[in-house]
Amino acid sequence: MFKKIIILTITSLFLFSCGEPNNPEDYSGGYKITKKVATFGDANDVIVDGNYAYLAQGEVGLAIFDISNPNNPTLVANQSGLKGYSTKLVKKNDVIYLAAGGSGFNIVNIADMNDIQISDQDINGKLVNIHLMGDYLVSSLSETGIKMVNIENPIFIDYRGTTHTNGFVRDVAISNDQSKMFAATGEMGLSLYDISVFDDGYGVYPLLSSVNLPGYTESVVLDEANQKAFVACGTAGLQVVDYSNPNDLKVVGSYNSAGYAKEIEYENGKIYLTASGMQVYDVTTPSNPKILGIIDTPHALGLTIDENNIYVADKEEGLIIIQKK
């Protein structure tokens, strides 16, 4: 009889524990997904210009969406036939430049959406990222370093000098006065170069200082008002670096976010970060970042923001639009 009571008690506990689970805790912080739009390829990166979103989508090339109504984005063009695997992109006027690894640049002229023109140009290295600086593409070439590329002629681009870096450069950020260049250099952390004497891109740019960071440094953005650099550091999450003394970079804050921190944006005291989902942080106190929300976008890679929305390139789900609070 005693054994039967024990068995019934255990069975009851098991049934209660395996019943309908409680609703999972909401970590979104009030951020809401407005729309998800599937893409034909792997959405790697997204930029927004006016009423259009442009996505680098791996082997499939470039997708262009009309986002004038964020609740109902419409596909304008899906441009395939590009070389390599497109991962990052920038836009100047009517020309889009896509980084395609060992295949170099894909160049897409969209002046006439009904007659899109494409070309490509090789580069000596693995092109992993591009930063637009006036008439130059500051190009991250992994182990090769940083190549300055002049685009005054938007189709036949002109290669200039190379700055060799310690580590595999993944991303750069340029100060507004174009005197400082920050390089996210993988396992070697963050480096700061003086580019104040630019010399038409041919200059030899001295290293001012560097700082080792945990994890793998993937992406960097600047808060110039407070002289802070925010860095996405892979498994080490968010790291905050003070550069008020450019000759002595110092880590002043961090947040060990869930997932692998990949892409980062900054605006008005907030950090937007793709890691395990799209994450939002309050960094008004840089030494003590605070999580504000985590939005369920498990394969998020690139992101960008505008006045009203956050746009995420999710490798599996495509373009995700999230309304700002």
Image (spheres, grey):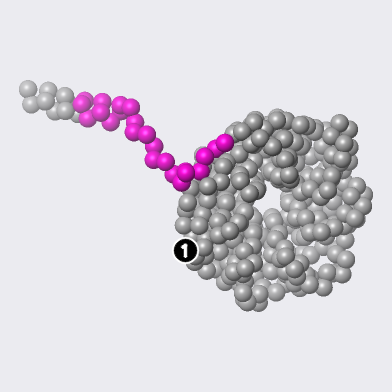
- Give above or below for 2 relative to 286: above
- Given residues 264 and 110, the one toward you in this image is 110
- Give above or below for 74 relative to 242: above
In the image, is 320 to the left or to the right of 281? Answer: right
Say whether residue 104 is visible: no
In the image, is 232 to the left or to the right of 51? Answer: left
- Could you tell me residue 22's position as x and y percent? 34, 33
- Could you tell me residue 205's position as x and y percent? 79, 70
Q: Is residue 52 magenta?
A: no
- Tell me which residue sits at (79%, 65%) in the image: 163
- Tell me which residue sits at (44%, 44%) in the image: 27
Say whether residue 304 is visible: yes
The quarter in which the N terminus is drawn is top left
- Give above or below for 20 relative to 90: above
Q: SS of the residue at dot 1? A: loop
Q: Is residue 17 magenta?
A: yes
For the magenta stretch, what is the residue range? 11-34
Question: Quadrant of residue 146 in the image?
Answer: bottom right
Residue count near mark 1 (Cα–Cα under 10 Å), binned few <14, some 14–19, many ≥20: some
- Tell me which residue sits at (12%, 23%) in the image: 4
- Given residues 8 and 230, the one toward you in this image is 230
How many numbered markers are drawn? 1
Q: Which amino acid does label 1 sit on?
A: Asn
- Tell me which residue sits at (52%, 60%) in the image: 283
- Could you tell me residue 170's position as x and y percent? 69, 55
- Given residues 300 and 312, the one toward you in this image is 312
Quickly name the residue at label 1: 288
In the image, is 28 to the left or to the right of 130? Answer: left
